[in-house]
Image (cartoon, rainbow, N blue to C red):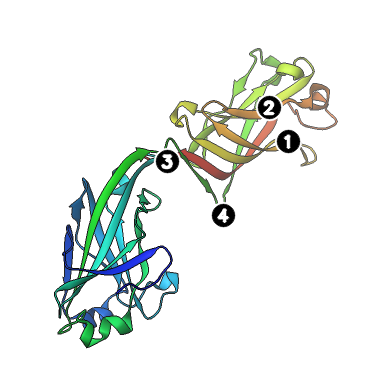
């Protein structure tokens, strides 16, 4: 009873499935009241846990109609190590109750399927046509009862290496932080930090260099945004953010600003400008950036995305 289908073998076998069977009674009621999907209990094969999943009227997300869809799924993928996969061959069964034989569907001989965290389910969208399944003479549905089965053979296991997960944020939230810097003329240290503040579940700080830093030393005000607690960010994690740093005019309600997009990580903890603005401009009474020895600094942060290692 071979039915041609590219890459799929269908045949009849006298031997029952080696690992699991599911008897479904009152199949017509399941068809009517189920959500379109049924998951079997868990069974073991090859040292792993598995389950059968079937769709009595076909898997809608695959646009399957007039067929039963039947799949094998690996259970407990959350416990798999990152990059770990199980290569297996499997056969899915349907009992012909009239002749005590089994209709078997499998991939072509020698074809393995890779089960892992991101692909834990394989099977057949069009396991069997409903017209064939419902035909009395075929013996698949007798007294409104049918029997499905599975056998699974694990061929090998392997670690494909490390990996990462990138998530871009659809509707990012903009965070603002304001810092009043006082006693500018009395600042003697190289750098002053703002009080840490939270944006996107991370702690940040503004770094203010009153006499400049690097290429800006001596002639420029240098301004940076930095992770306040970089050691709390795992080594493989990165945060993609749009940042703006501003020094606000106090007389005219304008500002001097810099804007950048940057990947922050435990090894790249800050972003900013050594030559943010000339000290001559900053200290000029005409512009009003420094009034009564005080300036107003602002940081705007929008978290656009995040990269993390594939979870354990």
Above or below, 252 against 211 in this view is: below
Image point 44% across, 70% down: which residue?
62
Mark found first going from the N terminus, 2 or 1: 2
Name the quadrant of the C terminus. Answer: top left
Residue at the far front in the pictured view: 1
How would you rate the neighbour count of disc 3 (Cα within 10 Å): few for under 14, some for 14-19, many for 20 or more?
some
Asked which secondary structure carries label 1, the reply is strand
Side of 159 where 165 appears, left or right = right
Mark found first going from the N terminus, 4 or 3: 4
Residues at discs 2 and 4 in contact (Cβ within 8 Å)? no
Residue ID for mark 3: 310
Image point 55% across, 45% down: which residue?
305
Residue ID for mark 2: 223
Residue ID for mark 4: 171
Above or below, 122 against 188 in this view is: below
Q: How far apart are the alpha carbons under marks 2 and 4? A: 28 Å
Mark found first going from the N terminus, 2 or 4: 4
Name the quadrant of the N terminus. Answer: bottom left
Task: Report if residue 293 is visible in the image.
Answer: no
Residues at discs 4 and 1 in contact (Cβ within 8 Å)? no
Residues at discs 4 and 3 in contact (Cβ within 8 Å)? no
Q: Where is residue 6 in the image (x, y as percent from the top left)?
A: 43, 66
Side of 277 where 20 appears, left or right = left
Q: In which quarter of the image is residue 210?
A: top right
- Number of the front mark, 4 or 1: 4
């Amino acid at each position: 009873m071979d039915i041609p289908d590219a890459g799929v073998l269908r045949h009849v076998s006298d031997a029952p499935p080696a690992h699991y069977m599911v008897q479904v009674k009152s199949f017509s009621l399941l068809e009517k009241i189920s959500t379109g999907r049924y998951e079997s209990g868990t069974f073991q094969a090859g040292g792993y846990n598995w389950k059968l999943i079937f769709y009595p009227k076909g898997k809608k997300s695959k646009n399957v109609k007039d067929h039963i869809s039947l799949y094998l799924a690996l259970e407990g993928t959350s416990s798999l190590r990152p990059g770990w996969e199980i290569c297996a061959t499997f056969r899915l069964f349907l009992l012909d109750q009239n002749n005590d034989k089994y209709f078997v569907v499998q991939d072509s001989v020698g074809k393995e399927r890779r089960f892992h965290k991101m692909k834990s389910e394989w099977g057949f969208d069009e396991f069997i046509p409903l017209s064939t399944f419902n035909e009395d003479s075929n013996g698949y549905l007798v007294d409104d009862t049918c029997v499905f089965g599975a056998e699974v053979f694990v061929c090998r296991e392997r670690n494909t290496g490390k990996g990462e997960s990138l998530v871009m944020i659809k509707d990012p939230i903009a965070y603002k932080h304001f810092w009043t810097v006082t006693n500018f003329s009395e600042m003697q240290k190289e750098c002053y930090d703002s009080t840490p503040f939270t944006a996107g579940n991370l702690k940040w700080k503004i770094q203010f260099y009153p006499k400049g830093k690097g290429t800006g030393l001596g002639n420029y005000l240098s301004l940076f945004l930095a992770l306040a607690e970089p050691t709390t960010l795992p080594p493989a994690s990165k945060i993609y953010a749009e940042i703006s740093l501003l020094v606000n005019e106090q007389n005219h309600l304008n500002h001097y600003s810099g804007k950048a997009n940057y990947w922050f990580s435990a090894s790249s903890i800050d972003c900013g400008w050594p030559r943010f603005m000339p000290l001559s401009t900053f200290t000029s009474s005409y512009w009003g950036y420094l009034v009564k020895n005080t300036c107003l600094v602002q940081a705007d942060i929008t978290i656009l995305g995040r990269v993390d290692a594939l979870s354990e």
